[in-house]
Amino acid sequence: MKKKRFKIPLTGEYILDVEIVIEKCGVDSFVINLRCMIEGMWHQVYRVDNAHGYLHEQRFWLSPEPIPLIQHTSLDYAFEFYMKQVKESFERYRSYYIQKTSLK
């Protein structure tokens, strides 16, 4: 088993915190957490993981409660899919968070 933790700076105000556990057969678990700097403070804006035994996301502009996701494929594919999705959507997620929390 290999466990990796790392940060991916998307810009100076956006960071992805990533944790992944890889077994011989592939990804066993993962966490992708998007943090954004807003008004001089870091805010957790979006997260997707399978830390509670099932694949789910948390859209913090709506609620901190996990939203279950249907896992049709392997965790390897899910990890790659959500990494790509977050990298393409991080500015939009920040915008939703600001609109719903009245931050600027």
Image: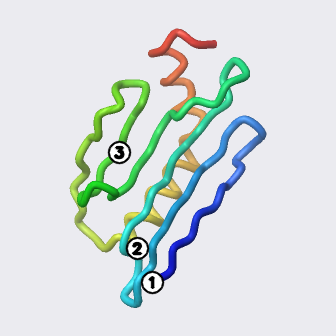
* Placement of the N terminus among the 4 image quadrants: bottom left
Which is nearer the N-term, disc 3 or disc 1? 1
Which residue is depicted at the point 52% across and 48% down? Answer: 86
Q: Does the residue at mark 2 contact the one at mark 1 (Cβ under 8 Å)?
A: no
Residue drawn at x 56%, y 70% is: 4
Q: Secondary structure at mark 1?
A: loop
Residue nearer the viewer, 23 or 88 = 23
**Discs 2/1, front:** 1
Give, as a three-letter code, the residue at label 2. Answer: Asp
Q: Residue furthest right?
A: 12
Split into 4 quadrants, where in the image is the C terminus? top right
Q: Which residue is mark 2?
A: 76
Density class for disc 2 (Cα within 10 Å; few <14, some 14-19, many ≥20) is some
Residue 59 placement, left or right of 45: left
> Which of the labelled discs sits on residue 57, or is there none?
3
Type of residue at label 1? Met
As drawn, the residue found furthest toward the top would be 102
* Picture disc at residue 1: 1
- The picture places residue 94, in percent across and down from the top left corner, at 56, 29
The image quadrant of residue 21 is: bottom left
